[in-house]
């Protein structure tokens, strides 16, 4: 089985699993082939080589799109039925989904393993339940992280019957496999200062924000005036993927608008010019 067919089949299976809330069955032959490809879970994508470059631009209207009625999802990277061989991942950043879920609807119980999963509500309330016994509601101004590790089942629903919930679903490859699954959730409203970038995620338990099993740092920037600032990378060999939530910004001369994505690597800092009203998420991750 060639890699493209494997990835296409695997990502299609992921969506079917999520929508149906069941684990897909495969033939004995398929299982052997997948074991030979070191499959570790339905969310696993075999590592692919990235091309040598300095920047990559993903305009908002070039993202993958799936509308299931109850779920309207925009995929920056290949996911489910959307497959683009040039958009499988950005370094260790595997998934960046911009999801809108209808009132009272959601994702049925489904499995993950060996993945760091981050949810950031942009509006509304997201209800979470998992096999670790966690029951929680994540609101705008909060961030949730789940280390799937050895394996976990969870569900996510719109907690409200009268309005949509909009949230970012982000997956990051971990730097250690088969860790003990864990869950964390904190408010980030008090951490995010205006007109600068504020850390909301890191690899260190003692640092500001939540932490994950990866040398990654996430920063949120909210700007109520025109601002020029510099973001210094935390680690050599990392890249930064900027995702514009609202408004317009400019990174190293590249102009970006709402929901545009822009990746930068082979450097140790970026210059950011943010217009009044802009809101942007910077995701710094290892590129190898």
Image (cartoon, rainbow, N blue to C red):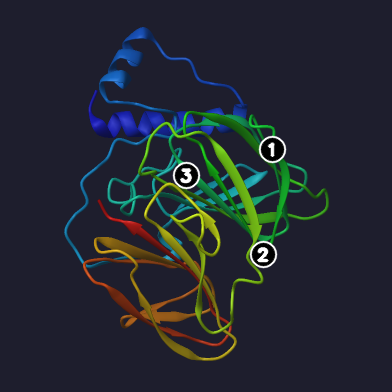
Percent from the top left, x then y, of residue 135? 73, 39
Picture disc at residue 141: 2
Percent from the top left, x then y, of residue 36? 25, 20
Picture disc at residue 254: none
Disc 3 designates what residue? 116
Disc 1 designates what residue? 134
Measuring 25% from the left and 51% from the top, which residue is drawn there? 288
Q: Nearer the viewer, mark 1 or mark 2?
A: 1
Measuring 38% from the left and 44% from the top, which residue is drawn there? 173
Specify whether residue 58 is in view.
no
Is 264 left or right of 122, judged from the image as shown?
Answer: left
Q: Earlier in the sequence, mark 1 or mark 3?
A: 3
Figure check: 238 above or below 191: above
Tell me the crowding category of disc 3: few under 14, some 14 to 19, or many 20 or more residues within 10 angstroms, Cα based.
many
Q: Earlier in the sequence, mark 1 or mark 2?
A: 1
Residue 62: quarter of image: bottom left
Q: Earlier in the sequence, mark 2 or mark 3?
A: 3
Q: Outermost residue, front direction?
A: 206
Q: Outermost residue, top direction?
A: 28
Q: Secondary structure at mark 2?
A: loop
Q: Nearer the viewer, residue 61 or 242?
A: 242
Work out which quarter of the rendered image holds the N terminus and state it: top left
Is 177 left or right of 53, judged from the image as shown?
Answer: right
Is 149 left or right of 160, judged from the image as shown?
Answer: left
Q: Outermost residue, bottom direction?
A: 226
Tell me the crowding category of disc 2: few under 14, some 14 to 19, or many 20 or more residues within 10 angstroms, Cα based.
some
Q: Nearer the viewer, residue 74 or 199?
A: 199
């Amino acid at each position: 089985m060639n890699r493209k067919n494997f990835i296409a089949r695997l990502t299609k299976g992921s969506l079917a699993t999520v929508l149906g809330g069941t684990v897909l069955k495969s033939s004995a032959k398929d299982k052997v082939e997948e074991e030979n490809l070191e499959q570790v879970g339905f969310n696993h994508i075999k590592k692919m080589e990235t091309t040598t470059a300095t920047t990559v631009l993903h305009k908002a209207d070039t993202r993958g799109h799936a509308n299931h009625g109850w779920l309207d999802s925009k995929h920056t990277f290949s996911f489910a039925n959307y497959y683009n061989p040039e958009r499988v991942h950005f370094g260790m950043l595997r998934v960046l989904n911009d999801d809108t879920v209808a009132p009272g609807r959601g994702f049925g119980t489904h499995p993950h393993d060996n993945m760091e999963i981050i949810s950031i509500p942009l509006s509304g309330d997201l209800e979470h339940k998992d096999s670790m016994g966690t029951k929680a509601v994540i609101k705008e101004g909060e961030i949730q992280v789940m280390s799937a590790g050895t394996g976990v089942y969870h569900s996510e629903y719109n907690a409200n019957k009268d309005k949509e919930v909009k949230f970012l679903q982000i997956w990051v490859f971990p730097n250690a496999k088969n860790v003990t699954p864990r869950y964390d959730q904190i408010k980030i409203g008090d951490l995010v200062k205006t007109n600068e970038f504020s850390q909301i995620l890191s690899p260190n338990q003692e640092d500001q924000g939540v932490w994950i099993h990866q040398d990654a740092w996430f920063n949120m920037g909210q700007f109520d005036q025109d601002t020029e600032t510099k973001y210094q990378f935390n680690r050599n060999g990392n890249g930064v993927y900027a995702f514009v939530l609202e408004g317009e910004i400019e990174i190293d001369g590249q102009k970006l608008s709402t929901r545009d994505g822009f990746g930068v690597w082979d450097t140790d800092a970026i210059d950011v010019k943010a217009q009044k009203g802009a809101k942007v998420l910077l995701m710094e991750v290892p590129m190898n």
